[in-house]
Amino acid sequence: MMDSDCLSLLPAVCLVLADPKQSPPDDTSLEKLLDWFMELHRQSNGQVLLQHHPCLRDFISSVCTCKTTDPAILSYTLKLTGLLAATVQGFDLLEEGGLLVSVFERETWCACDLWEDASVRSGWLQGLLNMLEHQQALDFICGNGLIKVMLQLQNDRSLFVACLANQLLVHILNFLTSSNVTNGSDAVGSKELSLRPDWVSVSSEIMNAVVETLSSEDQPQVLQGLRLLSLVLSQCGEPIRSMLWKDVLEPLKVLVNRGSESLTQTLITVLQAAVRTPLLSQSEYKVDVLLEAMLGDGNKKECFQCAALIVKLEKCPEVLKRKATNIILLPLQCVSTQPQAEEEINVALKEQLSQKASCISLLMQSLSSLAELAHTKYLFEDISIHSVTSSVVLLLRMCSGHCPSSLLHINTFTHLIGCCKVQMCGLDTLRALSVYEENVDLRKDIFGVLLDYLQSPDSHATVMKKTFQAIKRWIVVCLPFPDLLQFISNDLFSVLEKRLCDLRWEVRDSTLEFITQLTAALNGNSGFTEALHTSAMASALLSSLADAEGYVKASAVTAVGEAVIVSFHQTALVNNSNLLEEALVQMMSILSQDTEGFPRRAVVKVFTSWLKGSHPERVLDSSLSSVLSLGGNDFDWEVKMHTLELAEVLMEKTLTSCPYAIQNFGSSKEMHFTQALSRLKDYGLFDLLLNSLFDCDRPVCEKACALLVKLRTLTAETADMNHSTFVLNVCGNRWGDEVERRYINKASDERTDSGPNCIKDFSLPKILQILDLDDMKKMLTLSSDHVVNSPRSLMEDILSAAQQCEENIVDCY
């Protein structure tokens, strides 16, 4: 919000901006200034800026009558004028003396060729869009023939201007509809609309222009017309929507039957918008007929694109979706040589599959669309999901170089060998197909092909990551089957151990991420946990903590942390395993010595997850104070943030575990609470919070302040307790120096005759009272550049730049 001092600078800023001899500020400064005006306009509570600041009116008049105005300044002025005219009072003030007409009727300044600048055209449109908030603004637009200009700009050479023109036209149609529907009915074909004659002519002019554009031979015009139509369908109500659809139905049929590939995507966007309206349910609007026509007979490449888009539509007729599904599956069935497909495959499709680029494109469309259907658990009628899944498995085998003896299309096979795009798409599809229960019978084939991909030295790193995602999903699905654990311990673990030694760090990282996810997913499965710890996997994970790559080391920390969590549920396993002991040693070494931030962050997060779980604090007691100390003094702000999150969990577990109540404290409860505070002090938690409160990184200060506020609330609620025995030493540490410098002067009543230097100890509640936490919290919520980005600073910069410009002119002279 602009204060009075800021507003006092406004006249001078207006003079500088209106002066053509001054270089205009950069576009960012003008946009920021306009944003502040918008905020001021929203908070003005009906007051009109023009009444209190006549310099704005003078500025607008000066800019629009100047023959040498800079395009950026004119564009800004047009937007600002529209904003100021968005209220009826502001509109009336600007209309006095014809100022509003001189701004938006281009004859005043168009002679200077300013209209040729795209920023001026977009400013003109944005200004009208800003203004269109009341009926007088619509009257102004209709009465001055501005609709015709908007329709011309709909086909502007600047895509940004053309899109803005479409938005404005839709806003006008929507404004007409929302302002005049007599009963709010949104029924298709509703005629209950009472418009003034001039407004009827405006809506007819816009709709006729859409029809004319769609009938044009100029393809860019057709595209803009289709975009405007899709906006009307998605944003306007009845009867505009159905009236326009009836008018465009014939030219749409022509465009669909023409089969232009460059229009396919935009046509589908239009039909998709139509499907989401009640038009679909009315047969006379023929939305489903157009969709079916888009599919054609499947002979053209774009038909597969259309089918891929149609299956994603939410409210598509079932017959149409089935036809689209059949088309989608054809490339997959053709490549996998399914017998029932041979009769259906047409010559055009075979030709496309014999060419590498089109073959890969079609298969990727087929696979990705199949995955989309699987995510919705689509019921395939007349198609066996079992055979579809087998086709995907076969395709993945072909991509890795296994050629079936029955393969009829040898050219297609050569295109697929080692094709990462098809492999990644196929793996995503195979993972999605896990939602179908009948596919569980294929688990041996599925795990077989996935294991082959993991074992292959030629598998791309990204393909490997996709393989891990697929195998994890299928393991979760097949969990009830007894042969699964045997597969994991005998086959999978041995492959994972090799992948942890892969030369590519991305593969090692993906492997560790997979192990973490799998361990978390199978938490509670005693068989898996025992297999994990009794195999060589535990040793391999510990070895990964010494990986040379920081990302991998961080993932190893997380994986080991998860392995410790699942093992803790089995006491016998924990007693016989030194995993936790070795993990603690290596993790503390990483936290204290590692030069990269990622592993250190991971270590602190692992301690937090351990503490959140069922691990008793006694298991971690020997390490927690070191973690808090090292993490709190780390040079990486994210490590410090994670350390504060660990402190929060520790604080909650320690304090909430003591059985005290807010009222009726007993001596044992008081003692227990005091012991809890003492434990936190021994961990170094309070030193951590107080030091972090004065950290150089604002997020760290914010988090520490929030935790101290919680602590202050808790100690205030227990004010009846005797905290005198629990004190903190103010002197000799970083936070103590800050407290003494900033806040001790406020506590003069606590000082002795010997002076403030004798004050060394304060009780925790007293320190929390001395600290002005509420004020600090308020200041910390402000961004670090809140002063620099203020409107006052912005205006001062504009004025300063103008003065420097004058000084430079003098110096040069």
Image: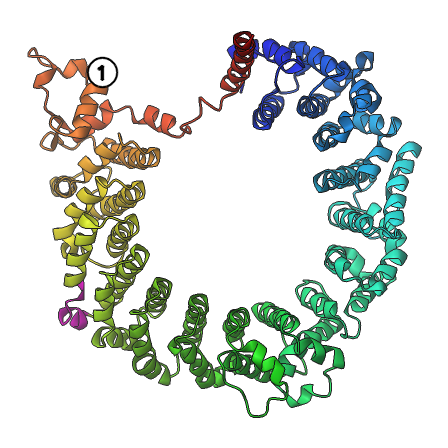
> Residue, x 20% and y 19% (percent of image)?
741
For the magenta stretch, what is the residue range? Answer: 571-580
Q: Magenta stretch mostly in which secondary structure?
A: helix
Q: Position of residue 211 (x, y in %)?
A: 88, 49
Q: Judge by depth and name the residue closer to the eye, 314 or 724.
A: 314
Q: Is residue 271 visible?
A: no
Q: Amino acid at mark 1?
A: Lys
Instruction: Give the image's coloring scheme.
Output: rainbow
Task: Please tell me whether residue 572 belongs to the stretch shown in magenta.
Answer: yes
Image quarter of residue 410: bottom right
Q: Give the crowd class for mark 1: few <14, some 14-19, many >=20 residues within 10 Å.
A: few
> Residue, x 22% and y 32% (percent of image)?
690
Asked if residue 771 lies left or right of residue 450, the reply is left
Q: Look at the picture and state if 629 lies above or below 471.
A: above
Q: Judge by depth and name the residue closer to the eye, 721 or 130.
A: 130
Q: Residue furthest front?
A: 813
Q: Secondary structure at mark 1?
A: helix
> Residue, x 22% and y 75% (percent of image)?
536
Q: Look at the picture and state if 454 lies above or below 642.
A: below
